[in-house]
Each structure stands twice: as structure tokens, then as C-alpha cells.
Amino acid sequence: MILSERLSLYMQLTRLNRPIGILLLLWPTLWGVWIAGSGHPAWHIVLIFVLGTVLMRSAGCAVNDYADRDFDRHVRRTRERPVTSGRVSPREALWVAASLALAAFVLILPLNRLTLLLSIPAVFLAASYPYTKRFLAIPQAYLGIAFGFGIPMAFAAQLGEVPPVAWLLLVANVFWAIAYDTEYAMVDRDDDIHLGIHSSALFFGRYDVVAVMICYTLTLMLLALCGLMSGLGPVYFVGLLIAEGVALYHYRLIKDRQREQCFKAFLHNNWFGAAVFAGIAGDYLVRT
């Protein structure tokens, strides 16, 4: 196999050809970076966390494909993934994941000791998440912790400590992750039942749509509290209102539980995260 074909397979393995996962991981990280930096974060820290987000999400996808290789062959949407189809070996997928995680660790070496220490649970969360679908009723909550762990790391990198608002932001991200990944799980509900995999869509059952909207509401309430704790002003709360509008639009998409519409809602969560970040960045910007 020529190099270009191998690189194409690695892009599929790490989902670099589908950036929505990177964005869902990046937005909460940037929330933390901007609030920790009071709207003026050190640019080398911004660069480190943006690149680290891409690397760790890519590593997590490779681990996910390794962990789910026996499940994926039974699902039409996933049976052609590189590991499941045999085009990338399981061992090769692990090497790719390890290499990417090592590169992410090298990136944070210039940062302080607390940030380095927090990177240990961050790696554990990313590597272990794919296996939680086997035993946790709502693995999406675990995903929210894994996808939000850049928040306390961002505060540690800039302040040398992790204040309460950082952990509250992390909790907000957990509820957001349950909301958007339940939308995603609604797409795969029948396959998950067949394979015996846990998901929030199965756990919530016929209350899945209500649960998604409750999680969006809790996310916004917690984000509002974080804004008050951080001294953010009107521009930030306008951003939250826009995010609320996005969530209400998602209700229109998922209320009938049509697969294509639920998947569209999942992808559209990029705009929810972007609206919150725009509110944060915009509020600090108008003060300067």
C-alpha cells in the first residue's frame, strides 16, 4: 500500500475527515482557556490546547475503533471503518493512538507541574471511555468528563490552580455531552439493542427527547452560574440566549425521533458550543 493510501486510512481512523468531534472537544476547552485567562490567555497556551485537543481526540478515535472492532462489523454505518474492515490492524491502531497521545504530552511539557499531573487522568479518561458502553447505563456522562477535562487543565496551566468555577464548567459540559450524544445514540438505538451496548437513549427510553432538553437546560443554567462567578456581563448572556435558541431548534429536529434529523441535531451542536464561546470572548472584548 502506497503512503498516500496509508495516510488516508489513518485520517479515517482518527476521524480527521470528520471534525465534529474535534469541535465538540475544542469549544469547552476554549471556554476554560478564555475564562482562566480573563479574556486574554497566553497565546502559547491557546496553541498548545488547540493542538492538544486535535491530537487527543484523534488518539481517542483510534482507541475507540480498536475497542469496538467486534461490534462495528455488525453495524452498517461502521462496518467499513479501517480496523473493522481489516485495512488497519488492531495493533497498528494502538500504535497510532499511543503516538498521538505522546505527541500531546510533549506539547504540555513546558507547562507547570499541576497541568502535567492532570494530564494523567485526562489520558486515562480518553482511553477508557470506549469500554464504558459495556457496563455504564449512561456512558455519555463519562464522555462529558473526558471531553471536558481540558477545562481544569486550562485553569491549571494559566493560574497554577483549579478554582471551583472550573469544576462547575466541567459539570456543565457533562450535561451538554449527555444532550448531544443522546441525539447521536438515538440514531443507533436499534443497533445498540441488538449488540447489548448501553446508551443514554436506551436508558431514557420514551423520555429521551425530554431528557435531552432537560440536559440542555441544566447546561445553560450551570453556564449562567459560571458567568456570574467569573464576573461576565451582558454579552456573555446574549451568547447563552443564542445557545438556548440552538437547543430549541434541536427539539424540532429530534421530537419525531427520525434518524437523519437526530444526526443533524448532533452535528449542529457545534453552533451551541460556538455561541457560548462567542459570548465569553465577546464579553471580554467589549471591556478592552
Image: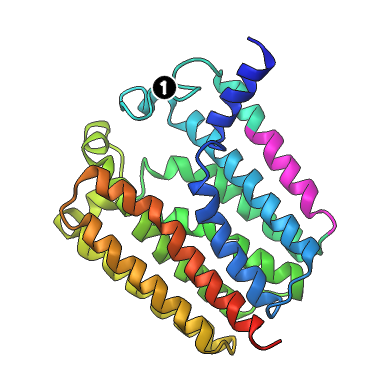
Q: Position of residue 143 (x, y in %)?
A: 46, 53
Q: Position of residue 251 (x, y in %)?
A: 24, 63
* Position of residue 103 in the picture relative to residue 276 (left or right): right
Let me know if residue 283 appears in the view.
Answer: yes
Q: Position of residue 233 (x, y in %)?
A: 54, 89
Residue positioned 25% across, 34% down in the render: 191
In the rendered image, which quarter is residue 42 located in?
bottom right
Q: Is residue 103 magenta?
A: yes
Q: Residue at the top extreme?
A: 1
In front of the other: 217 or 139: 217
Q: Quadrant of the N terminus?
A: top right
Figure check: 188 above or below 113: above
Q: Quadrant of the C terminus?
A: bottom right
* Position of residue 178 in the picture relative to residue 146 (left or right): left
Q: Position of residue 57 (x, y in %)?
A: 58, 45
Give the amino acid type for the residue marked by disc 1 in the picture: Glu
Residue positioned 72% across, 46% down in the render: 104
Residue positioned 27% across, 32% down in the render: 195
Figure check: 179 above or below 160: above
Disc 1 residue crowd, few under 14, some 14–19, many 20+, Cα 10 Å: some
Residue positioned 65% across, 73% down in the render: 34
Figure check: 23 above or below 70: below
* Position of residue 6 in the picture relative to residue 131 (left or right): right
Magenta residues (range)? 97-110
Q: Secondary structure at mark 1?
A: loop
In front of the other: 243 or 139: 243
Residue corresponding to mark 1: 80
Majority secondary structure in the magenta region:
helix
